[in-house]
Image: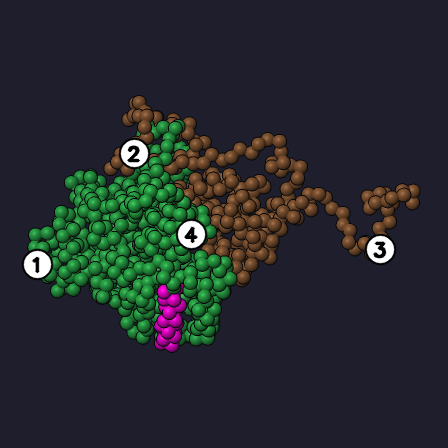
Amino acid sequence: MTEATTTAAPVEKHELETRFPDAVKAEARPGYTGFLVETSKLTEVATALRDEMGYDYLSSVTAVDYYSDAPNAENFIEVVYHFYKSTGGGALEIKVQTPRENSTVPSLTPLYPGADFQEREAYDLYGVNFEGHPDQRRILMWEGFAGYPMRKDWKEAYFEEEVKPFKNRWPEGQVYRIEDRNPFNKNNKYPQGFDPVGFKETDDPKLYEVLERAAREYSEDIDTEQVVVNLGPQHPSTHGVFRMAVRLDGETIVALKPVMGYLHRNHEKIGERNTWTMNMPFTDRLDYLSSMSNNFGYALAVEKLMGDKAAPPERAEYLRVIMAELTRISNHLWAVGFLLNDLGAFFTPSLYAIQERELILDIFEATTGSRMMCNYFRFGGVARDLPEGIYGKIKDLVFERLPRKIDELDIYLSENELVRSRSEGVGVITPEEAIAFSTAGPVLRASGVPYDIRRADPYSIYDRFKFEVTVRQHGDVYDRYMIRLDEMRQSLDILKQAITDLPGGAAGGEVMNGKNPYQVRVPAGESYGRVEGPKGELGYYIVSNGKGNPARYHVRAPSFINLTVLEKMCVGQKVADVVVNLGSIDIVLGEVDR
Amino acid sequence: MTDTNPTVNSAGYEVPPELRQNVAVTTLDKIWNMGRRYSVWPMMFGLACCAIEMICTAASRYDLARFGMEVMRPSPRQSDLMIVSGTVTKKMIPQIVRLYNQMPEPKYVLAMGACASGGGPFKEGYNVVSGVDQYVPVDVYVPGCPPTPQALLHGLMKLQEKIDSESITTVRWYGKDDIPAIPVPLLGPDLIDPRDNELIKQETSKKPAAPAAPAAPAPAAEAAS
């Protein structure tokens, strides 16, 4: 875990610093990597990074609030960018700092359209104003919400203490109900002097304004009557509580704006109050179809900071890979089944897919105690070894049953004429667009970009396995469907190798580096751990101040960022294709909204 | 036989032997409830992680249909049961209340999982409603995070028991009084429950810092920075 994937190679470091001697400073804080950039020069530096140095993929944008109420403390908000080359390699991390009052940073959305939603999120939660952003509205909370909730000095109505474990519950165990201390008996608070009578909501009017503006940009020639249709948030084909406001000209889409936040559960705010270990079960609930992969990314990020004392034993590394790849298969089964649902093959293909998924869940349940929320990884290993008989079960599944069943899905579905005519040529994304919009995972690879973190920037023990980075060339819905079948087959290949090589085999062995700790100490510093999750690049950006809780805990959620490209996919097409396009991105709302 | 045209209900009527195994005497309530308990149509409505387990419950392995509940309806107008499967957020609660109001009586609510029952692990979150029962009445709570399909099935059987215990003479939807709709919450500087309006006004005007209440609610984003 010690390979420094977030450190830039020395050559680039030199390059960026010599190119901008005044504007770029190498990070000097202990435990930090990357470069500090002058706010006013950000656009220039980013342009040079993209056009001259090959860092064309802006993976993650987020903000960190460095706040302390101590006198003379240096308070500022820092916006952190992670750049990658789409040809592979480690990250180049740049940061800009801005005061907490009137925070303003130039927007990178015109350069990297994939920054769109991420900047809106930073605006929403931190109040950073992105100058030049084309559509700066709140994204997770609603327009009109009081305050920027992720700021350190913003407290929720149910606020008890800065950090967990709360003193009243541990060690004395005096429990009270927090709602009893709130005048409304609810999780609400209101600003001084607020009068609820006659109050008008402001969220939707603003959205419709934006739709109208986008529609005008789309076509100016004939003035036809257009209608706005809201798909969701309660809609059987939106894969959860997700809403798309679509402006239609006849049946043709002229503008589409995703509206999210209906499942915003304040993962990051709660994560900054939790202890490091407490966050592990919370990561399960991000992308609740693939909890093992979520654990993986978080464990990597924290282990990177903790260093060698948290290096997992060999068997644990193999178990991690086995579980992560089983998760990928179960996730893709679900994705394929439900994509067919969206195509109109209502529930029959899904039932086939769910049947196989259940067998994988059985393995998870036997190993971890829970079907979906596995909470299996620990810093320095995994929570427990495989129980008796499970090794054989995995072996049967991987060598015998799953290859057959994946072929079965392939035979039944891939050549089906209806499937092909509904999905070929629909929602096309070119490779350039896929990179510019920061898409990740199957969406990126279906557009002809062979980028897979397991290969491009290997983590854990993935460099030991032989597998292909699958890639498809057309970037349409059909390819995004096919790539998932391909990936399942590659995962099976990895699984076959991992099961055969598993140290200790069926007999068991050491799975934890030392004792499984109740609480860990993480040295001060920052780290970014990323894994190739089933939906794409899942990254955790964490900042530690050496205490028992993270100072900043950010999730780079692939579903959320992949959605940025949805409008691009849909505009100009028929409204019936919206649902298919959304299904082909394969989102999970727990991760989109966090 | 004095009655020239005897019916089954006439006293002393001889039930023909071929019918003796086929006639049962019961109450109207029982027949009525049996029909209802085996035809509960849940709304196809998933919020979060629990929705996945709900789908698995409906799929072939656990098969909700065995209990007469397989017809998931995407429209509230055709549903009897709202399974609140997942975390209820402030942004979503207006829609949930609206959907609940749109369901015709008799209607039931099942809170699936820890979040829907009381906020669960996300209770302290600024966008999380700590339990759907703060807004709509809940009939059955199913614990778990997420509840396994078996637990959900058990919860649904509990609901059937509840349906069984009802009587046509006392249920509120045959009563004379109108059943009022639940006021839909608004998204203001925070979630506004219209039933709390008086209390909110009292609380926000209480502190000495604001002597005269400004009329317009602050456009929150700017006001807070």
Residue indicated by mark 1 = A18
Mark 2 or 3, nearer chain start: 3
Which one is in front, A311 or B42?
B42
- Numbered tag placed on residue B219 in the rendering: 2
Distance from label 2 to label 1 (Cα)? 45 Å
User: Is residue A251 placed above or below A291 in the rendered structure?
Assistant: above
Task: Chain letter for brown, please.
Answer: B
Residue indicated by mark 4 = A238
Amino acid marked by disc 2 = Pro
- Numbered tag placed on residue B17 in the rendering: 3
- Give the label, 3 or 4, closer to the camera: 4
In the rendered image of this protein, which colour is used for chain A?
Answer: green
Distance from label 1 to label 3 (Cα)? 105 Å
Residue lying farthest top?
B212
Q: Magenta residues?
A: A479-501
Which residue sits at x=28%, y=59%? Answer: A434
Distance from label 3 to label 4 (Cα)? 59 Å
Residue lying farthest bottom?
A500
Does the residue at mark 1 contact the one at mark 4 (Cβ under 8 Å)? no
Percent position of residue B186, x then y: 40, 36
Amino acid marked by disc 3 = Pro
Amino acid marked by disc 1 = Thr
User: Is residue B194 placed above or below A451 in the rendered structure?
Assistant: above
- Circle 2: is it few (<14), some (14-19), or many (20+) Cα within 10 Å? some
The prevailing secondary structure element of the residues shown in magenta is helix
Q: Is residue A124 visible?
A: no
Which residue sits at x=84%, y=50%? Answer: B15
